[in-house]
Amino acid sequence: QVQLVESGGGLVQAGGSLRLSCAASRSIFSMRRMGWYRQALGKQRELVAAITSGGTTNYADSVKGRFTISTDNAKNTVYLQMNSLKPEDTAVYYCNSFYSGTRSDYWGQGTQVTVSS
């Protein structure tokens, strides 16, 4: 089992920045992959950014150059730095991990990000 706790969401004006944090209950060295997804009202959940245990990252085209995913292994935490935010980034953001021990996906409870124009 893995518990993921997100924080850092909120309301920000367009062009502003936020940093989301996701604290894992297990060492992130044991996670094959960690990532951030988002779900806007009335839309499907989509991948925003992910990072593998080897450090490989990938991003949705819509956030490339604006968002950065990173990890702090000592704190078992993954971050999503979001810059130059746009109203279309408004969504609930979910942390996700694929834990090698159970070969299962785990999800956080989600954190709301609202970008005003």
Image (cartoon, helix red, strand yellow):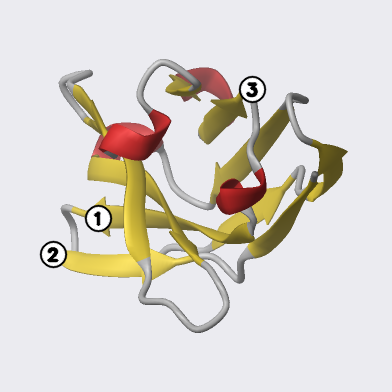
Q: Is residue 94 shown above or below 51?
A: below
Amino acid at dot 3: Ser
**8 and 73: which one is in front?**
8
Residue 95 in the image, given as x and y percentages of width and height: 48, 54
Q: Is residue 76 shown above or below 45?
A: above
Q: Secondary structure at mark 1?
A: strand
Residue 33 in the image, given as x and y percentages of width and height: 23, 42
- At x 21% / y 29%, what residue is drawn? 53
- At x 35% / y 24%, what residue is drawn? 64
Pointer 1 or 3: first along the chain: 3
Nearer mark to the viewer, of 1 and 3: 3
Amino acid at dot 2: Arg
**88 and 17: which one is in front?**
88
Amino acid at dot 1: Tyr
Which quarter of the rendered picture does the N terminus lie within?
Answer: bottom left
Q: Secondary structure at mark 3?
A: loop
**33 and 100: which one is in front?**
33
Give the CA distance from mark 2 to mark 1. Answer: 5 Å
> Residue 103 — which label?
2
The residue that mark 1 highlights is: 99
At label 2, counting other C-alpha atoms closer than 10 Å, the crowd grade (few under 14, some 14-19, many 20 or more) is: few
Callouts 2 and 1 close, C-beta under 8 Å: yes
